[in-house]
Image (cartoon, grey):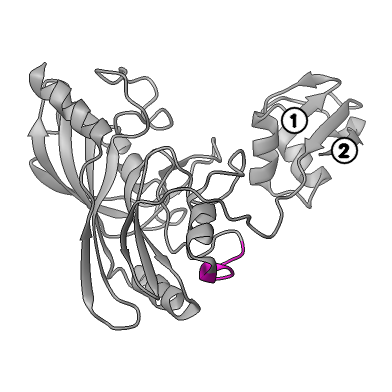
């Protein structure tokens, strides 16, 4: 941990804390500054303040900046739900609660570290701290992920994702009764300007195109069981799109805040990557994988059906 001490000039009176810090400490990104403020690692005259705090001028500002993570990743012998594996590709069924790669607050217990222990050949494929990682699933989301074991496989798989030829189908339970039996959500997604850790529907010039197809599988009195297919792969795409319709995913405290709690104790998101279709990066064989609905979601659906 490195402690930085700064003094606010009197001429800066009235400036927002986060914006002043962005100018005062240019080596830190705006996202990093927001992260430090939200974690309580920024103090103004000894008091923790929010990002929108207005400075008076002449205050002392202290920052506790964590040391950057090491550039290498330590392998961890964590059990993996392996669906398929050969010399080039690894497909796993990720459990809810597991983070894909290290990040703020998640240094250990990641899928990437488990993959590195299982297949040391992935070291350096795609990045030292994301060995073999081609795409992600959120911590609370379970289901299928494909990883590359060689550089050639990594390049081919990332090219397929960029060309939108990889098919990914999800199952979800959302709040409310979705009216249409099926539909398409075509709404750009970008960073939420008010909450930089979140994504939001944005104007076309400020977001990236995001397209999700959905169909209703089963309706309950206050919830809906759905199938969804991603045409694009934006961060939190399904979660943001469903929340924009007024039907956030059950268990989503980020985009479903203010909605009633799940009808029973429930961990993670009621979102599961159930089907994955792609072309093998070396053999060019068309491949299809499925992952059964996890017990936590089976129990949720059983509860809803019996209510």
Does 233 lie within the magenta span?
no
Above or below for 48 versus 138: above
For label 1, the SS is loop
The residue at the far bottom in this view is: 283
Which residue, given by chain and number where applicable, does mark 1 sit on? 41
Above or below for 212 versus 243: below
Above or below for 134 versus 157: above
In the rendering, at what x and y percent does residue 53 appear? 71, 25
In the rendering, at what x and y percent does residue 117 appear? 53, 58
In the rendering, at what x and y percent does residue 25 appear? 81, 46
* Residue drawn at 37 percent across, 43 percent down: 95
Which residue, given by chain and number where applicable, does mark 2 sit on? 4
Residue 221 shown left or right of residue 14 in the figure = left
CB under 8 Å between discs 2 and 1: no
Alpha carbons under labels 2 and 1: distance apart: 10 Å
- Image: magenta residue range: 121-128
Above or below for 143 versus 140: below
* Residue drawn at 29 percent across, 83 percent down: 283
Residue closer to the observer: 115 or 97: 115
In the rendering, at what x and y percent does residue 144 appear? 31, 54
Q: Quadrant of the C terminus?
A: top left
Residue 208 appears in which quarter of the rendering? bottom left
* Residue drawn at 34 percent across, 82 percent down: 282
């Amino acid at each position: 941990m490195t402690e930085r001490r700064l003094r606010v000039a009197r001429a800066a009176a009235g400036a927002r804390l986060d914006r002043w810090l962005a100018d005062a400490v240019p080596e830190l990104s705006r996202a990093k500054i927001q992260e430090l403020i939200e974690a309580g690692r920024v103090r103004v005259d000894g008091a923790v303040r929010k990002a929108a705090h207005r400075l008076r001028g002449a205050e002392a500002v202290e920052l506790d900046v964590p040391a950057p993570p090491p550039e290498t990743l330590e392998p961890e012998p964590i059990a993996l739900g392996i669906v398929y594996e050969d010399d080039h590709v690894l497909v796993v069924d990720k459990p809810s609660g597991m983070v894909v790669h290290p990040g703020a607050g998640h240094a250990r217990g990641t899928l990437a570290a488990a993959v590195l222990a299982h297949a040391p050949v992935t070291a350096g494929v795609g990045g030292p701290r994301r060995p073999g990682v081609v795409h992600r699933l959120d911590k609370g989301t379970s289901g299928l992920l494909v990883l590359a074991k060689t550089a050639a496989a990594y390049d081919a798989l990332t090219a397929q994702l960029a060309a939108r030829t990889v098919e990914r189908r999800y199952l979800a339970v959302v709040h409310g009764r979705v009216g249409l039996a099926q539909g398409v959500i075509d709404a750009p997604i970008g960073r939420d300007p008010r909450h930089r850790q979140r994504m939001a529907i944005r104007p076309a010039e400020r977001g990236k195109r995001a397209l999700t197809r959905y169909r209703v599988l089963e309706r309950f009195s206050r919830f809906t069981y759905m199938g969804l297919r991603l045409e694009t792969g934006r961060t939190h795409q399904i979660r943001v799109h469903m929340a924009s319709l007024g039907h956030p995913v059950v268990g989503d405290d980020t985009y479903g805040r203010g909605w009633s709690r799940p009808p029973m104790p429930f961990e993670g998101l009621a979102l599961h990557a159930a089907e994955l279709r792609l072309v093998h990066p070396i053999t060019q064989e068309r491949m299809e994988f499925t992952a059964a609905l996890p017990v936590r979601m089976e129990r949720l659906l059983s509860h809803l059906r019996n209510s």
